[in-house]
Amino acid sequence: MEPAITTATSSFGGGSSRLAALAQQLRQYKPPPSSSFDDAEETQTDQETAGKVVSQVGFQESIAPVSKDPERFKPKRAAVLICIFEGDDGDLRVILTKRSSKLSTHSGEVSLPGGKAEEDDKDDGMTATREAEEEIGLDPSLVDVVTSLEPFLSKHLLRVIPVIGILRDKTKFNPTPNPGEVEDVFDAPLEMFLKDENRRSEEREWMGEKYLIHYFDYRTGDKDYMIWGLTAGILIRAASVTYERPPAFIEQCPKFKYPKMVEKHTCMP
């Protein structure tokens, strides 16, 4: 099914009329307002895991700041890039990465390009596109940043802002993965994250609240990928906003009792 977009705009710098209309549609989307976490204090998480946003999600009891000192809980800010382009068959697709198998944590997991904000980043769009360039060689000038989604809270208490960008001309992007971080770059149809096909879920519980972790199995060529947790949760939301319809399955997001420093609009997939 096509996304609900009907009007093209000449202001879009290249690409098909469909991508132009999608850019116009997404620019009109505004996430719920939230306050800034600038100069936030990092809380009990190793640097490698905090620096790169990975797919695993869920809280562990050993992560103590929430219960020990909620008044001081200020999660670090990060951003990931949901880079959408038009496939050869006319479908909307999103760029994903597989983390290097040599990494000491979360090796081989699927993720979106992204990482922690740096002092020189003027906004979340700059964080996401800068990280994408560092990880997979995606020139920021090729990407139109059109909107941001509601923030998500990762397993390691990292506040992640999903940034949606549109790749105007996919032929100009030649993936060059950073071997220290990325093992593979691939793309998947965005609409698959609204379908109940090749999906399974696992119920978990934290602080008395039950929630679902979603797993999507995806095969392209001779390679199989599993997209799950935080990455899956973000892509379900991105697909819902893009196609303007809910998923064909129950998300069952948790209703965690966040500390005062976490806004009520922060999501936990």
Image: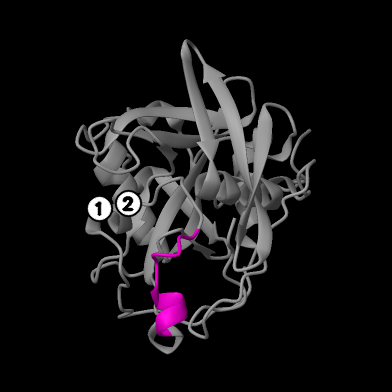
Task: Name the colouring of the figure.
Answer: one colour
- Left or right side of 35 for 19: right
| Quadrant containing the N terminus in the rendered view | top right
Q: Position of residue 219 (x, y in %)?
A: 54, 19
Crowding near the residue tagged with mark 2, few <14, some 14–19, many ≥20 C-alpha atoms within 10 Å: many
What kind of element bears circle 1?
Answer: helix
State the residue lying farthest toward the top: 222
Q: At x 41% / y 59%, what residue is drawn?
A: 79
Q: Majority secondary structure of the magenta segment?
A: loop
Q: At x 32% / y 36%, what residue is drawn?
A: 107
Would residue 171 be seen by someone viewing this image from the given angle?
yes
Q: Position of residue 252 (x, y in %)?
A: 73, 54
Q: Is 157 placed above or below 110 here?
A: below
Which of the 4 quarters of the picture holds residue 267? Answer: bottom right
Q: Position of residue 98 (x, y in %)?
A: 38, 33
- Viewer-proximal residue, 55 or 69? 69
Counting every numbered tag in the picture gives 2
- Left or right side of 48 for 188: right
Q: At x 73% / y 48%, what residue is drawn?
A: 7
Which residues are the magenta region? 59-69
